[in-house]
Amino acid sequence: MKIVSQTKSWLQLFRAHTVVLEAPMAILGAAIGLGTFFDPRVGVWAIFGAFYHLVGYGMNSYVDWAKGYDKDDERKQHHPLNTGDISPDTAKKVIYASTFGLALFALAIGGFSDIAFIFTAIMFASGLIYNFLGKKLTLKPIPISIAHTTVFLYPYYLYSGEITVYAGAMTVAYFIHHIYQIAVSGDIKDLDQDEASLIKSMGADVTEDASRGVKVFAASTTALFFSYILTSFELLFGIGSIIAKSGIGDVIIPGAIFGAAVLYETDKMLTPGKFLRSKRLQHISRREFAGYSMIHVASIPIIGWENFGLLIACMVLYLITVSKFIWGTWITPDV
């Protein structure tokens, strides 16, 4: 039982349930760059994408705790560094050793070429800025969005050596998606915490309604405009990448379905009213999955319908099983 509980604690620290965010981007970047899904290098990039996620989010968990943010957050007292299930010193050693290993992996997978050094430098510089300074930076979505987007762009450019309209549109769509997830989704769930927030600076806020004894969420006109503009551009470039590669055909159908889900969940998470954080997190989680999936649809002309279906099925299966194991919920993490 101790092995199981320790495994669960480490998976919580690394936020392993959301490996399905970065790993598919690395897989698709490599597959599109190579022009095929069936190449051993695609599998190597899948490992890299998973490793990138675990290291990056593990560092974020440790740094947020070490700086006092998660120590003082009453909603995170069950996290392993607060419960003592993982010692801070052990976590620090593991995080920094794995970060060094990830850097070597990133360079080696690119053959220690100029491209490898450039993308690795960009990825790590932007990721470190976010992890160490993000709580104080209103514009924190920019560095982490750069880091995450390179997970797709690095393998693609490594093997293709060019940026087409098709791949360029996918890259921009991923970047905008990440901006939204940090600037809007991430800030909404922690809007009542004392940290820098872009939408809070725009007037969005969570306040106490003393008469009802509840917290109430309200988004300003500026915050709503910003959120829906980001969503519109994500849809524009996501669907645009599909059209750029396959025209107006059957491939656009799943893209439109996922796009409609993005719009629906965006509206739900931004609706003013009672701030039930767990309920907002459900909409945030579903919007994130739908947004990624919509952009992934653009890969169908390269990897085929069957492999795309397999990718989405694996994403869903992994997410619900790992989330259930480490958080006790099927899709909404207790973070």
Image (cartoon, rainbow, N blue to C red):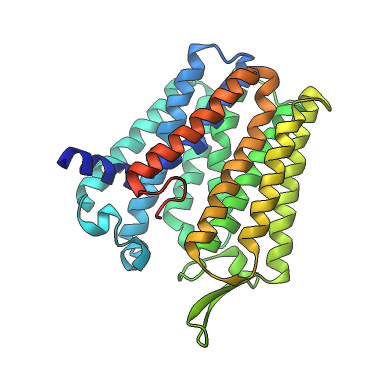
Q: Which residue is depicted at the point 60% across and 24% down?
A: 308
In-image side of 19 versus 237 (left or right): left
Quarter of the image for residue 257 reads top right
Q: Is residue 96 above or below residue 194?
A: above
Can residue 108 be spotted in the picture?
A: yes
Q: Is residue 218 above or below residue 181?
A: below
* Image quarter (top left, top right, bottom left or bottom right) of the C terminus: bottom left
In-image side of 278 versus 170 (left or right): left
Residue 220 spot, x, y in % from top left:
68, 72
Residue 8 spot, x, y in % from top left:
28, 43
Residue 177 spot, x, y in % from top left:
63, 45
Quarter of the image for residue 268 reads bottom right
Q: Which residue is depicted at the point 18% across and 38% down?
A: 3
Q: Is residue 296 above or below residue 148?
A: above
Q: Which residue is depicted at the point 42% across and 54% down?
A: 132
Q: Which residue is depicted at the point 57% across and 46% down?
A: 288
Which one is in front, 21 or 271?
A: 271
Q: Is residue 134 above or below residue 44?
A: below
Which one is in front, 180 or 74?
A: 74
Q: Which residue is most to the top?
A: 39
Q: Which residue is most to the right?
A: 248
* Image quarter (top left, top right, bottom left or bottom right) of the N terminus: top left
Residue 291 spot, x, y in % from top left:
63, 42
Tally of marks: 0
Q: Which residue is most to the bottom?
A: 211
Can residue 158 be spotted in the picture?
A: no
